[in-house]
Image (tube, rainbow, N blue to C red):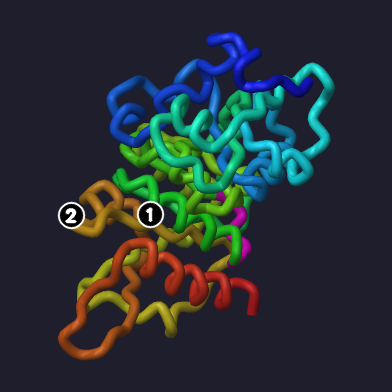
Amino acid sequence: MKLSFHDASPDLLDDFAALTDVVLRTRAEPSGGLFIAEGAITIDRAFASGARPRAVLCEEKWISSLPDFASDIPIIVGSQSELNSVTGYIVHRGALASFHRPDPLNYLDLIRTSRTLLILEGLVNHTNVGAIIRSAAAFGVDGILLDNHCADPLYRRSIRTSMGTVFSSKWARFADHAALAVGLAESKYDVLALTPRPEARSIRTWSPGERSALILGTEGDGLSADAHGIATQELRIPMAAGIDSLNVSAAAAVALYEFTNHVHS
């Protein structure tokens, strides 16, 4: 259902109002049980994943790039300046779509049905979370577990940085390290803590078991004592002398390449 910007009622535009990072970080998420996909690629991937669309806001030239939405989904068409006036920022990719959030997965079910897991602890930066999800998808990790302190994978910036791979990835939240440890132990996971500690084993020499989980923590504090307590081994990325760490998303890409290469070889 195509509508001109001027014919769209305020309630139809509400999904897209004030989407700047500053505003989003000061209001409860998820807002109204929705998420925003930005750009034709991420909109298409969200729709292909089965997410239910609510509304679209776009420039005329982007309509042909959109998926075949049902006829009752409002597609609000305006100029870039009109889009910007609603969102509060410059919409470079020309199209936004709001979707209903999917029902969350149960992390224990994800543990039981996976062979490889990535566990994220305390990663509050949306860009890092999105980039790590993209790497996990690229290297074929079965599932991703995030603690309740991690940034929202369905936040606009996370989705954009993941290039929409968050929609094809299986991920779930966990709240309690003790319950996580029990679930991993019951499913017989080899749990690997990635750390810059020099005494840790090089990830290049690690040999995988039947099931493996890799834990990543924050750049500043690293993994918590609880996370180290869950680990059955500690691994490090070998680096040149004088360099002891990488940005967490870069470290994740390197580690996941080695991790999945060992698992699948």
Local SS, label 1: helix
Residue receiving disc 1: 128
Vertical arrangement, residue 55 with respect to residue 243, above or below: above
Position of residue 106 measured from the top left corner of the image (x, y, whole percent): 56, 32
Identify which residue, 15 or 250, lies in the foreground.
Answer: 15
Regarding residue 113, the answer to whether it shows in the image is no
Q: Image point 82% across, 25% down: which residue?
A: 70
Local SS, label 2: loop
The part of the image, by quadrant, that contains residue 90 is: top left
Magenta stretch: dominant secondary structure? loop
Left/right placement of residue 135 relative to residue 167 reads left
- Quarter of the C terminus within the rendering: bottom right
Vertical arrangement, residue 241 with respect to residue 108, above or below: below
Left/right placement of residue 72 relative to residue 11 reads right
Residue receiving disc 2: 221
- Quarter of the N terminus within the rendering: top right
Q: CA distance from mark 2 to mark 1?
A: 16 Å
Going by the numbered disc 2, the residue's amino acid type is Asp
Position of residue 247 measured from the top left corner of the image (x, y, whole percent): 30, 66
Does 239 lie within the magenta span? no
Mark 1 is surrounded, within 10 Å at the Cα level, by few (under 14), some (14 to 19) or many (20 or more) other residues, namely: many
Does 141 lie within the magenta span? yes
Left/right placement of residue 122 relative to residue 70 reads left
Q: Image point 46% across, 33% down: which residue?
A: 84
How many labels sit on residues?
Answer: 2
Q: Which mark sits nearer the N-terminus, 2 or 1?
A: 1
The part of the image, by quadrant, that contains residue 191 is: bottom left
User: What range is drawn magenta here?
Assistant: 139-143
Mark 2 is surrounded, within 10 Å at the Cα level, by few (under 14), some (14 to 19) or many (20 or more) other residues, namely: few
**Circles 2 and 1: CB atoms closer than 8 Å:** no
Going by the numbered disc 1, the residue's amino acid type is Asn
Work out which residue is located at the far bottom of the displayed protein and give it: 241
